[in-house]
Image: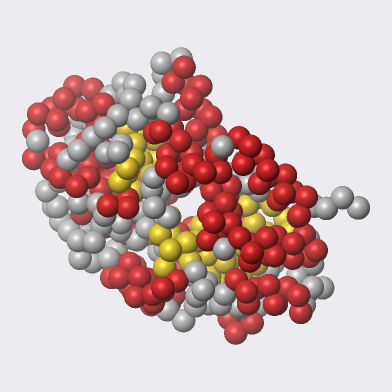
Amino acid sequence: MSPFLPRLLRTAALACACVLPAAGAHAERDGTLYAAAVREGRVIVHAATDERIALPLIRAFEQRYPGVRVEYEDLNSGELSRRFLDETARGAAADVLWSSAVDLQIKLVNDGYAQPYRSTETAALPEWAVWKNEAFGTTFEPVAIAYNRKLLTPAEMPATHAGLLRVLAQQPERFRGKLATYEPSTSGLGFMLHTQDVIANPVVFWKLAEAFGRTGTATLASTTEMLDRIASGEALIGYNVLGSYALLRAHQDPAIGVVLPRDYTLVLSRVAFIARGARHPNAARLWLDYVLSREGQQLLAQNPGFFSVRDDVPDDAAATELRRQLGGAFRPIPIGPGLMTYLDQVKRRDFLRKWHHTLFPAP
């Protein structure tokens, strides 16, 4: 395990007891917006964010804003976009979409499915976390390598992508059939993480893909499936795992270890937007402001691996520690049109074809 990860887990745990009692979000001060949200009565949020992570945020929001109910549904990142498009065509879509598949979110915004919104809370975000005042980064989450700590010691786990290549080359039998990663054709998040990895270091990514193909790798649709396999010993290593879920699981399960690669660690911010056709637009604005407020950010940062996207949240020491320890390896994925590069149909087809031919070569 990276030497600073226990410190990150400790600082995140301390933050649980330090949530500001009343951050005074802009939307709360705007009685007109709150009154309009109460008349609407609810906000429908569809998210690729585990409900157990969102639940404290939902409860705090409903307590702060009586009369506005949150109807929350947790979906797979790929299913989230497909369902939104289908329901939009029928005039019955969610009010807010919130997903870690940032590229799919940006494509929906680019295609005109979001409405602009500006507030004190959106203005507090860093420049890279806002696009067109329509797409908003809500978290700060590293992309990690997870492993089974009972079957691999921390000293045996490489600290870089090149180190992982060497280990797989030196011990192919040990890892045969014991690797796991996302299946990019079924996981929207997996597709985004793998293609961002290609952009960060194409030579190493495809060499790793070749090593995965030689060794035998399970390709799965979700982080939970990967972590379950690692915890059981069915897999030894999971590659390009969403670090927020991996760190949360490691906090609860001593079998899970987490490495943030020291050559480069991609960091994503799951994106939220308000649907252009939102049936409860004022409640949606109220919800978004709360998620982005200092209080909302602190609630999210209670979860190990989830860090505040804002720089002015005083108790998120773990985020400061993460930035400091990674130094030059810290690679935030900017929210913007560059994320759509591999959503071009030809590029997507070519990437998936090369991925499958590399991991599952014909005999």
Outermost bottom residue? 155
As drawn, is 273 to the left or to the right of 210?
left
Please name whichever residue, 97 or 58, is drawn nearer the observer in this view of the structure: 97
Outermost top residue? 90
* Quarter residue 40 falls in: top left
Is residue 147 positioned above or below 2 on the image? above
Is residue 33 positioned above or below 39 on the image? below
Q: Position of residue 163 (x, y in %)?
A: 63, 77
Identify the residue at image location x=64%, y=57%: 181
* Quarter residue 171 falls in: bottom right
As drawn, is 232 to the left or to the right of 317?
right
Q: Position of residue 293 (x, y in %)?
A: 21, 49
Identify the residue at image location x=23%, y=35%: 117
Identify the residue at image location x=42%, y=79%: 4
As drawn, is 190 to the left or to the right of 107?
right
Q: Position of residue 132 (x, y in %)?
A: 30, 38
Q: Residue 213: in sight, yes or no?
A: yes
Q: Position of residue 42 (x, y in %)?
A: 28, 27
Identify the residue at image location x=76%, y=75%: 169
Please name whichever residue, 233 or 320, is drawn nearer the observer in this view of the structure: 320
Picture mark count: 0
Please name whichever residue, 195 or 50, is drawn nearer the observer in this view of the structure: 195
Q: Residue 297: in sight, yes or no?
A: no
Please name whichever residue, 286 or 72, is drawn nearer the observer in this view of the structure: 286
Give the colour scheme of this rendering: secondary structure
Is residue 343 positioned above or below 306 on the image? above
As drawn, is 240 to the left or to the right of 232?
left
